[in-house]
Amino acid sequence: KLRKALLKQNISKKFADDLFNYIQGYAHYGFPESHAASYASLAYKSAYLKCHHPAELLIGLINSQPMGFYPIDTLINEAKRNGVSVLPMHPFYSRWEAYLEAPKTVRMGLAQIRGLSQNSAEEMIQSRLEQPFSSFEDFVTRTSFHRDQLETLALAGFFEVFGLDRRHSFWRSLEFAKLIERKAPTLFEAQSQAGLFTLNSNKDRQQSSQIFTPLTLFESMSLDYKKTGYSLEGNLMKALRQDLPHLPPTTSDEVKLIGQGQTVRFAGILSVLQRPPPALGTAFI
């Protein structure tokens, strides 16, 4: 059937015979037909979705984790190259799973935050529906996240909407018991009374003075990877080069232009590494 179809498409008889013989030889030890057919079907459907519905495909893959060959960060960056906007987790909008917030726009969910329980997240969403959160303190008092979860949320940048960067919100999360019990003013309440915090009425956000040194881009992205397994702040290598300018400057695009057989020194982030036994020591990176 294959050979006849090739000849019908004006493929040369020699090419059709050679291709047929290659497949015939491989069939003695290769994939069973049903396996090959299912792979072909999945490949076609995935390619169609990636072309016509890249945001929906990304959502499906994210919400099906853990699965597959590629880490979630690779999936997100590939979708962004296909025109998909990926929005960060947000206390006002995020659900447990990622969802389509607008055409070709994905809002990340809370499921990727390591150590976070779904029950606590669902309770937060229900509390948010009853009344929007007005501040970090309001969020803490009206949710059931325990201390470790609040610290993780803070370091993942979840509270930046309240005008607090990661280090400031992390420090507040350490004092969340006092915020609830109201037994004594916290460090931040004392700083506020001293006039170090001002309210921007235009944005209705609380801005703090520089009590802590701002995180570098690499520090911020490193926290993202530790707490969620991905980062939406850009390319990790670009951030790393800012902190470590002595790294080899060769980029992946430049490597493609170097002749075969030459030795290359380069720096990169290892996202996938496989050493399958049938590959006889070859590693796929």
Image (tube, rainbow, N blue to C red):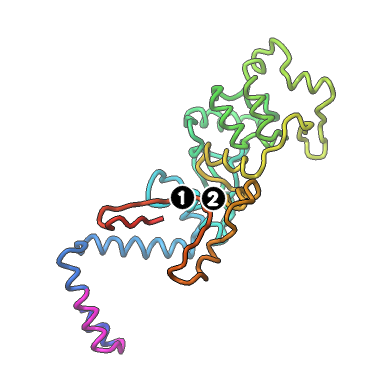
Tell me which residue sits at (67%, 37%) in the image. Answer: 160
Farthest residue, direction top: 183
Q: In which quadrant of the rendered view does residue 134 lie?
A: top right
Which residues fall within the magenta stretch? 9-22
The tag on residue 197 is: none
Tell me whether circle 2 and circle 1 mark residues in contact (CB < 8 Å). no
Q: Position of residue 79 (x, y in %)?
A: 52, 57
Q: Which residue is mark 1?
A: 271
54 or 178, nearer to the observer: 178
Farthest residue, direction left: 28
Mark 1 Cα shell of 10 Å, populated few (<14), some (14-19), many (≥20): few
Q: In which quadrant of the rendered view does residue 93 lie?
A: top right
76 within the magenta span: no
Q: In which quadrant of the rendered view does residue 31 lie?
A: bottom left
- The amino acid sitting under disc 2 is Leu
18 or 232, nearer to the observer: 18
Q: Which residue is mark 2?
A: 100
Instruction: Give the side of residue 151 with respect to residue 133, left or right.
Output: left
Q: Secondary structure at mark 2?
A: strand
Tell me which residue sits at (39%, 51%) in the image. Answer: 273
- The amino acid sitting under disc 1 is Ser
Figure quadrant of the N terminus:
bottom left
Q: Is residue 257 above or below residue 154?
A: below
Q: Is residue 262 above or below residue 181?
A: below
279 or 72, nearer to the observer: 279
Q: Position of residue 232 (x, y in %)?
A: 59, 48
Figure quadrant of the C terminus:
bottom left
Q: Is residue 53 above or below residue 61?
A: below
Q: Position of residue 10 (x, y in %)?
A: 30, 89
